[in-house]
Amino acid sequence: MADLAAPRAGHLGGHAPIEHIPSLPPLIGDYEERCRRFTWEGARAWLDPDPSGHVNMAHEAVDRHAAGPLAGVVAIRFLDRTGEATELTYAELRTRTNVTAAALRLLGLEPGDRVCTLLPRSPELYLTVLGTLKAGGVYCPLFPAFGPEPVRERLALGRIRVLVTDTLSYTRKIAPQRASLPDLEHVLIVDPDEAGAPTGTTPWSAALAAGWAAYDPETFTVAPTRPEDPALLHFTSGTTGKPKGAVHVHAAILAHHVTSEFALDLRPGDVYWCTADPGWVTGTSYGILGPLSCGVTIVTDAADFEARRWYRILHDEQVTVFYTAPTALRMLMRAGTALAREHTFPTLRHVVSVGEPLNPEAVLWGLEAFGLPVHDTWWQTETGAIMVSNYAGMPVRPGSMGRPVPGVVAAVLAQGADGRAAVVDGRVEVLTGPDEVGELALRPGWPSMFRAYLDDPDRYAKAFADGWYLTGDLASVDADGYWWFVGRADDVIKSAGHLIGPFEVESALMEHPAVAEAGVIGKPDPLAGEIVKAFVTLRVGYEPSPGLARELIAFGRHRLGSVAPREIAFDQALPHTRSGKVMRRLLKARELGLPEGDLSTVETAPAAATDEGATT
């Protein structure tokens, strides 16, 4: 196995573990003891077990609270772009989602039929999610900023029967290609002026009015779904080819609930803000289902990112738990710590990150801005829920993903020449030594594991070997059981016989005061095979120059030795996925003039890197 040349991010700069005493006793309790005693079977009693064996995500998220002491508690507080708030209590949310389910049933929705939303964050989106699940349908989110082709492709691949969207999205993205979507029978239009709904669509208000007329609270029943019945369809893009549709089942709500307690430390009385858009898996699992299952008040904001607004929401809404992405944290960092210090956050007790590895500097910045370290989490669309986390009350090691969730069995597998797990005669080798690098693998058995790639059984089968789910991520485990992300197997740079993790190099560069963000790729080299090239976004107050590029190369060499970047380019608009990840493969494709592959998830087209770089 090739060794990893770059040191782990947690050792960059010698960051010591951060001890933080939370204001409330952590729900996970003693980690080691919890791991010894926890079972998924035993945790089912934490929800609302049905003697007949049925389980429905929406019932667990809403109805069981609406029937108890939390009925009058605000479940969701919607902030529109002006800051005006609309609230729904758990009791109101139960009724409104029942009506939505009744409306969908009137449209002919059958169990297993798929319903999609293409909407901004609004009450109608949340009602559709929960109403679909109550009706026995399968919910499929779409990100509202998708262009026409990504929308059409996902609607076609998912054979979506009902779409809930707005007039502008429909006329621009759906109507011109409606004829190519034979499975799309119903389009519900959410619009203040629904009287002018386009031809071939139904106003949301009309569909809901029919639902109200048909809804009888005495006879309405949530669909008697079984644990293995499909509930969610999440599309995730590969580097090339069509999107993959990961299928999740109703049993996943148990993992959503348990990880919301353990990793997010959520409990009734919390005010919780997850900044992920519901168009992504995080926005569904931890923006809706998981937190509602814990009986908290969710805050959701319809406006785009603006640092001052975010700080104001954290203060004014008295947020207690904040779940966001490393990209958002880096944007807050770029706005300066002084802006954060203009506000106070007396209720905030837990800050958590998701979406991509969290650089050590962002963990430490949390102490400056909030007086709290940022706790990283790791998971994938396919895992459906958090698998590795830094927990409240546990020392945070900056740069580490943390430790596996109780009930999750993880391992590091030996690598082959391509960086992926080496499978020999159907068997894999599990590495047991501290700091050995290999492919992160998970033992199937947690409730939120995806059950299929839609209509692609061969691809699904290739995701498993010798009783392990192969994640495609490289990682290591230190002597104390903390896990460290190295990179995607297909991102790792092969230089002079070594494997270099781009995340470690990016994290090292971010320790320089000029660097806000970095993306690192391997560039072909006739001698070394590949050299490291870094694309760097600068903080406010710094300007690109050849001198600064040389300084960054020297800084990297001092921190990393021979695996430091050999080339630096400045780019103030690195390409990101819409869920916040730096798209290294797109940086590499553009550097080498290669096909760019699937661009449906790109947030913005990056500005061209300046010529004021340097090479060694």
Image: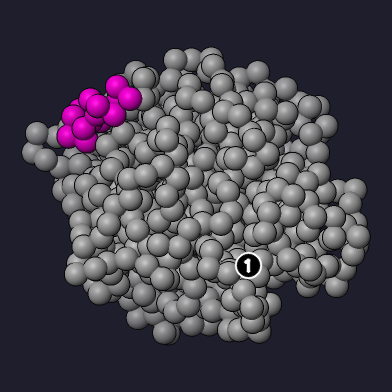
Q: Is residue 169 visible?
A: no
The answer to which of 421 and 322 lies nearer the viewer is 421
* Residue that appears at 63% across and 33% down: 15
Highlighted magenta segment, given as a residue range: 32-47
Q: Is residue 426 magenta?
A: no
Q: Is residue 154 above or below residue 381?
A: below
| Above or below, comparing residue 452 to residue 289 in the picture | below
- Quadrant location of the N terminus? bottom left
Give how far across and how far down residue 512 sits, in percent. 78, 46
Which of 153/421 is in front? 421
Q: Position of residue 403 (x, y in %)?
A: 41, 36
Q: Residues within 10 Å of mark 1 (few under 14, many from 20)?
A: many
Task: Give the camera-side residue of 262 and 550.
Answer: 550
Magenta span: chief secondary structure: helix
Specify the quadrant of the image occupied by residue 288. top left
Residue 589 image offset from top left, x and y in percent: 62, 78
User: In which quarter of the view is residue 172 placed?
Assistant: bottom right
Q: Amino acid at mark 1?
A: Ile
Q: Residue at x 43, y 57 (%)?
A: 473
Residue picked out by circle 1: 521
Relative image position of residue 259 (x, y in whole percent): 37, 36
Quadrant of the rendering where the C terminus is positioned: bottom right
Say which residue appears at 29% left-offset and 52% top-offset: 430
Relative to 156, 594 lies left or right:
right
> Which residue is drawn at the image coordinates 61% and 20% (left, top)?
347
